[in-house]
Image (spheres, rainbow, N blue to C red):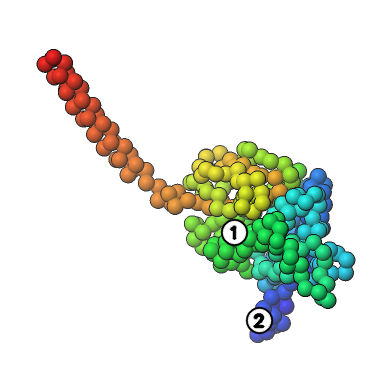
Amino acid sequence: MLTDAVEEGGMGFDYCWNMSWMKDLLSYMALDPLYRKYEHKKLTNSLANAYNEKYILEFSHNEVIGGKGSIVDQMPGGYEEKFSNLRLLYGYMMMHPGKKLLFMGQEFAQFRGFNESVEIDWELLEFDAHTILRNYVKALNHLYKKEPALYALDNNVEGFEWINATAANESIVSFLRKTSRKEDTLLIVCNFTPVSYSKYKVGVPFAGNYKEIFCSDNEKFGGDGSKNTVVRTSKRSACDGKANSITIGLAPLSMSIFKLTKDSESSPVKKTTTRKTGAAKQTSANRTKRTTKVARTTEKE
């Protein structure tokens, strides 16, 4: 009851740090992806108590002092894999219910831990990888402000829904962020292994066309490029407890976000049929004219 109103017996604080979320997620991300399937609950347990308080998801000074190193340095793998894991970590953080806190220097992947005696390593921004990551965090912030589903019902259980929280062997989670409006719904799919999928089936809440609006593996973010350059049309094929599903490409160590396109909302079936019929009549008439003209010309000759 730290963030409950004083009038209701609470402490009246605006927010409470979600320490268990932070500890579970960092220990999960530090694992070699091969072993993440054995700790899958560390990804999903946080939703069991996400609405007990009004939480801040924090990567604070506590996580980068006392020899712990920086957040990027806690990621497994080589140089490129560390950055892929970090983009995925920050993406999952931004999609998860709760406000966000990221300690200075972590937004551009400072490698050493924090030292209060010196300034942070601004010189790293001379290198592309660090500048690109800063731009990635900036893009996440803009996305957060643009999409109401990420904040409108942040402290309401109606704002979140698991699509699949049990794909432990693949280390993949998929979920929805929502508002009271269908068209605001976001489908988020996170792949926590370096395995690529060309045809990964995922359930969707509504029939229609789904466009990928964000991908952590985009080339401009330092990745290999999105696997979903075309709109995905749902099929009446059950998956994840949903009647409809889409098949998507899923990059290794990546987060992809999908949203219903506007043409899915209008369903202009009759108009399309009418236009096609009209076009067919006009084409038929033109063919008749061309045939008549050719026949007359031949006859004259």
Q: Where residue 131 sits in the image (x, y, percent)? A: 67, 60
Q: Which residue corresponds to mark 1? A: 177
Q: Which residue corresponds to mark 2? A: 5
Which residue of the protein is positioned furthest toward the left in this rendering?
300
Query: In this rendering, is residue 5 above or below 19?
Result: below
| Residue displayed at 88% across by 66% down | 67
Q: Is residue 75 left or right of residue 230?
A: right
Residue type, numbered disc 1: Arg
Instruction: Name the element at disc 1.
Output: strand
| Depth order, front residue of 272/110 | 110
Q: How many marks?
A: 2
| Residue displayed at 51% across by 59% down | 184
Q: Where residue 163 sits in the image (x, y, percent)? A: 63, 50
Q: Is residue 263 left or right of residue 240?
A: left
Q: Residues within 10 Å of mark 1 (few under 14, many from 20)?
A: many
Residue type, numbered disc 2: Ala
Which residue of the protein is positioned furthest toward the bottom in this rendering?
7
Checking the image for residue 265, the label placed there is none
| Residue displayed at 23% across by 26% down | 287
Q: Where residue 154 sits in the image (x, y, percent)? A: 61, 67
- The quadrant in which the C terminus is found is top left
- The quadrant in which the N terminus is found is bottom right
Q: Residues within 10 Å of mark 2 (few under 14, many from 20)?
A: few
